[in-house]
Amino acid sequence: MKAILDHVGIAVKDLAAALAFYRDALGLEIEPPEEVASQRVRAHFIPVGDAKLELLEGTAPDSAIAKFTDKRGPGLHHITLRVDDIRAALDHLKARGVRLIDEQPRPGAEDAQVAFVHPSAAHGVLVELKQAPATRDAVIASAGRSPATTVTRHTVGDLELVSLHDGTFRLDGGSMFGTVPKVLWEKQAPANAQNQIILAMRPLIVRGARTMLIDAGLGDKESAAFHERYGVDRGRSLAVTMAEAGIAPEDVDIVLATHLHFDHAGGFTTRDRSGRVRPAFPRAQYIVRRGEWEDSNRSSAQTRSGYLADNCAPLADAGVLQLVDDDATIMPGVRVRRTGGHTMHHQIVLIESKGRSAACTGDLIPTAAHVRDGWLSAFDLYPMEAMAAKEQFATEAMEKDTLVFFAHDPAIAAGYIREEDGKRRILPA
Ligand SMILES: [Zn+2]
Ligand SMILES: [Zn+2]
């Protein structure tokens, strides 16, 4: 079992006196207090390197901390060890006959799950086990990356590009990186206790002769059960980020799809008050590759995964769907190119103006980590084709110094492809 010292709990009777030592005499910084109502205790955390001290103050005479200090005076109360999987840790200890206070984890401070081992088993020390919450911020911070959910603007010649956000979801890290060993991918994309990684959904606006939206995220039609299954967090939704960018749904002339999986095409439609599903962008023409459209309507078990009927059929019903057969220019400076690989008719969007270039790669390079040829996801239906398309695209993008937009990277909206010692990496924009 891997356990890391998280903090040392110190029971305090007179908080002012304790602060006079820890804060004033030692000069340490005290974090704002946190109340754990169920334990009738107030916790004051003090960062000391990678671990913390925790001053514990009883908030009622019958709290465990008040009873502790009444009986023994203030002093060392417990040490807390952080484990990756608290249930597995408890099972492991139980199997070795270790006496536990808590056989099941319970909620602790800072939204963590905790469980106590009996002091008799730990040679007189109360040991708390803790599993930190796997929030998006915690997962990303643990890899030293900060989540990027802000709207960013980029200029490519005469065109303006605006990177938007439709929240995040979670997928199994192993599925997302296919045959890449976990020891390699988890450095790029830290996984939570369920082995899931965080993925953003990043639609892109291109403003030129017309206003175009490329992909639209998950949208607002899915059930709470669906959100639960995929760990969806749409706090930073497409509607919110579009409003921040000063773009109204009515401003969009063209909606363009890289492909029709739910995390790209869900936002194409919305459910109105009567429960009817209608196009989310009332003036827009929706442009989809014919082969992709046909596959999304097919009943093959393989192609159907990821396609949801409500995202597409209402577009045809509303008469706003335009199918394109081949690689074509969609508006001045913007063209599509079939890559296949991820789905048979997956396409990328190439943007060029005045000698500058950008690209929206859809699920060809979903995150910056996927820029290496062999880093394919298990969701790619045609992996060899995906690898070849990626190689071709990356070579071109390096020649043209293309600004590459990533549909799913939680931290990097866009960057440039660089190659050093035969290894590709992304230089964030
Ligand atoms: Zn996809
Ligand atoms: Zn996707």
Image (cartoon, helix red, strand yellow):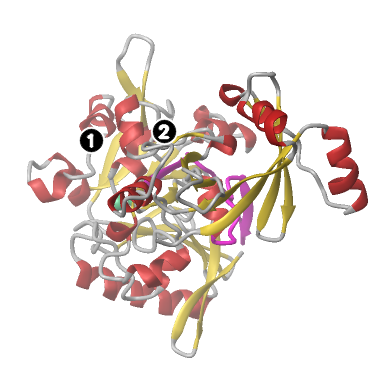
Q: Is residue 312 visible?
A: yes
Query: Where in the figure is residue 377, as x and y percent of width and height?
Result: 29, 62
- The structure residue drawn at horizontal position 25% and vertical position 34%, both measured from the top left corner, is 312
- The region drawn magenta spans 143-170
- Left or right of 343: which side holds 7? right
- Left or right of 25: which side holds 247? left
Q: Residue 27: within the magenta?
A: no
Query: Where in the figure is residue 408, as x and y percent of width and height?
Result: 43, 53
For the residue marked with disc 2, what is the amino acid?
Answer: Ala
Tag 2 residue: 284
Whether ligand 2 has any atom under 8 Å from the Cβ at mark 2 is answered as no
- The structure residue drawn at horizontal position 20% and vertical position 73%, both measured from the top left corner, is 384
- Left or right of 119: which side holds 330? left
Q: Nearer the viewer, mark 2 or mark 1?
A: 1
Q: CA distance from mark 2 to mark 1?
A: 21 Å
Query: Where in the figure is residue 320, as x and y percent of width and height?
Result: 31, 31
Query: Where in the figure is residue 199, as x and y percent of width and height?
Result: 43, 50
122, above or below 239, in the image:
below
